[in-house]
Amino acid sequence: MRKTIIAGNWKMNHLGADAKATIQGLIEKMPKDVKAEVVIAPVFPYLSTAVEMTKGTAIHVAAQNMHWEENGAFTGEVSPAMLVDIGVTHVILGHSERRTYFNETDETVNKKTKAALAHNLTPIVCCGETLEQREEGIMQSWIEGQIENALKGISEADIKKVVIAYEPIWAIGTGKTASAAQAEEVCAIIRKKLAALYGAAAAEDVSVLYGGSVKGGNVAELTGSADIDGGLVGGASLKADDFLAIINNAVVK
């Protein structure tokens, strides 16, 4: 059975004191019997702090990016082995902001996904379309292409360890949210593509998240949809109470 996952992508936000306050708030107020898998993704300088603070809790820590090589002359980069060394368990790959601002490609996402799996990190692989692509009628082929290219060479055994996050680029940080029906349509397309690549049984084991202005007030409708298994949350994950509202209201299948 696939997991319900609520992951908070902090992006380039929070200094150390803010990060500690958010984490402490989550630890103090999160229900002891929380059913969803909870993940937070602080910036690199505070990953070790997050790992230390969340030891013994239900909170997992993700990095927002990584390189695919083990080590080498890659100034400014961080390797999967380094993330594992400090206790990180998840990594976000191919976020639209990485693709737009830092030249991330399907090829690099594929390399990073393979490297994450090789180091027992859970890759959260992002995909999504622009408003122009949606209006041009190429949304489905674009999403399917991103999925196929990101997962090239990944085995059926390993695909069950991958998380997919669908984020319509037009709904990230804009306050606009895809309707539950729109989000479900694309998440169903993703699962159908996974079934074509790996078989229906394997596709049913992959958690597919929705991201794009997810809030406590809309998460129940979103996660109540058949093919949406949680959320990749941006701004609403920066404050403990806002993030807890999403965690507490998410539908766990």
Image (tube, rainbow, N blue to C red):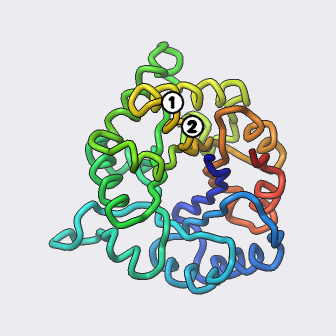
Compared to 94, does 135 lie above or below? Answer: above
Tell me where residue 128 appears, x and y as whole percent: 49, 35
Is residue 103 at all visible to an observer of this figure? no
Residue occupying the point 77% across, 37% down: 224
**Is 155 or 125 nearer to us in this picture?**
155
Q: Quadrant of the C terminus?
A: top right
Give the residue type at disc 2.
Answer: Glu
Tell me where residue 61 appears, x and y as whole percent: 55, 70
Give the residue type at disc 1.
Answer: Ala
Asked where in the image residue 229 lies, by quadrant, the reply is top right
- Calculate the distance from the C-alpha at mark 2 to the C-alpha at mark 1: 6 Å
Instruction: Please rate how many residues cluster around mark 1, counting C-alpha atoms within 10 Å: few if below 14, some from 14 to 19, many from 20.
Output: some
Residue pushed farthest top? Answer: 137
Is residue 64 at all visible to an observer of this figure? yes
Compared to 203, does 28 lie above or below? Answer: below
**Is 98 or 183 nearer to us in this picture?**
183
Report the residue marked by disc 2. Answer: 204
Tell me where residue 180 appears, x and y as whole percent: 73, 30
Instruction: Please rate how many residues cluster around mark 2, counting C-alpha atoms within 10 Å: few if below 14, some from 14 to 19, many from 20.
Output: some
2 and 1 marks in contact (CB < 8 Å): yes
Residue pushed farthest left? Answer: 73
Q: Does 175 sit left or right of 150 as displayed?
A: right
**Is 123 or 196 nearer to us in this picture?**
196
Tell me where residue 23 appears, x and y as whole percent: 69, 76
Q: Secondary structure at mark 2?
A: helix
Report the residue marked by disc 1. Answer: 200
Asked where in the image residue 244 lies, by quadrant, the reply is bottom right
Q: Does 74 sit left or right of 141 as displayed?
A: left
**Is 239 or 124 nearer to us in this picture?**
124
Residue occupying the point 81% across, 65% down: 241
